[in-house]
Amino acid sequence: RKRSHQLGAMAFSASTVLAVCAPQSYFIASLGVAAAIVFANLGAAYGTAKAGAGIATMGIMRGDMVMRSLIPVVMAGVLGIYGLITAVIINGKLDKPDTLSAYTAYALLGAGLCVGMSSAAAGYAIGIVGDIGVRANAQ
């Protein structure tokens, strides 16, 4: 009985371990961290810049409404914070690189890309709509 237990442990070879825990898994998961923070902050920067240009134009026409028109800038800034929070959560899952499977690495990459790209699209939309809305509010 003891002998069969030892044979089961020996059947698990080093090539099987590398197939489950591939060396590039940590790099792929780290790309998820980078994608979350980079794309989210690109969207936040675009939204802030575009809405800020609208606020500057509106401030010339109606200076008393500048503070009321800062909502699109705040909304765009929150997108960068979403990316940062996601990057920290993904990075927290990378504490044991030798046990990180390829499945988990691609899942973390997908999570980072999902948050990053959706924040980039939302920042683009907030920038355009915020710019037009702020200028329309001044009229």
Image (cartoon, rainbow, N blue to C red):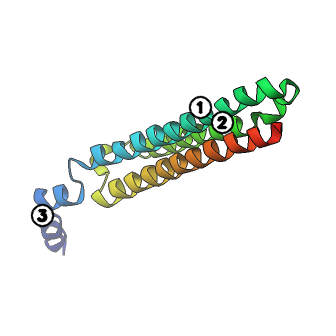
Q: Nearer the viewer, mark 3 or mark 2?
A: 2
Residue 49, labelled with which disc? 1
**Which quadrant of the structure image shows residue 21?**
bottom left
Q: CA distance from mark 3 to mark 2?
A: 63 Å
> For the point 48% across and 47% down, which residue is it?
116
Q: Nearer the viewer, mark 3 or mark 1?
A: 1
- Quick check: 74 above or below 18? above
Q: Is residue 95 left or right of residue 73?
A: left
Residue 10, labelled with which disc? 3
Please, which residue is most extreme toward the right here?
64
> For the point 53% across and 38% down, which residue is it?
84
- Amino acid found under the numbered disc labelled 1: Ala
Task: Find numbered disc 1 in the image and state the secondary structure of the residue it sits on.
Answer: helix
Task: Find numbered disc 2 in the image and state the secondary structure of the residue it sits on.
Answer: helix
> How far across and how far down the image is residue 32, in percent?
39, 47
Which residue is identified by label 2? 51
Q: Is residue 68 left or right of residue 11?
A: right
Task: Find numbered disc 3 in the image and state the secondary structure of the residue it sits on.
Answer: helix
Q: CA distance from mark 3 to mark 1?
A: 61 Å
Q: Report the front residue among 3 and 139.
A: 139
**Which quadrant of the structure image shows residue 126?**
top right
> How far across and how far down the image is residue 125, in percent?
60, 49
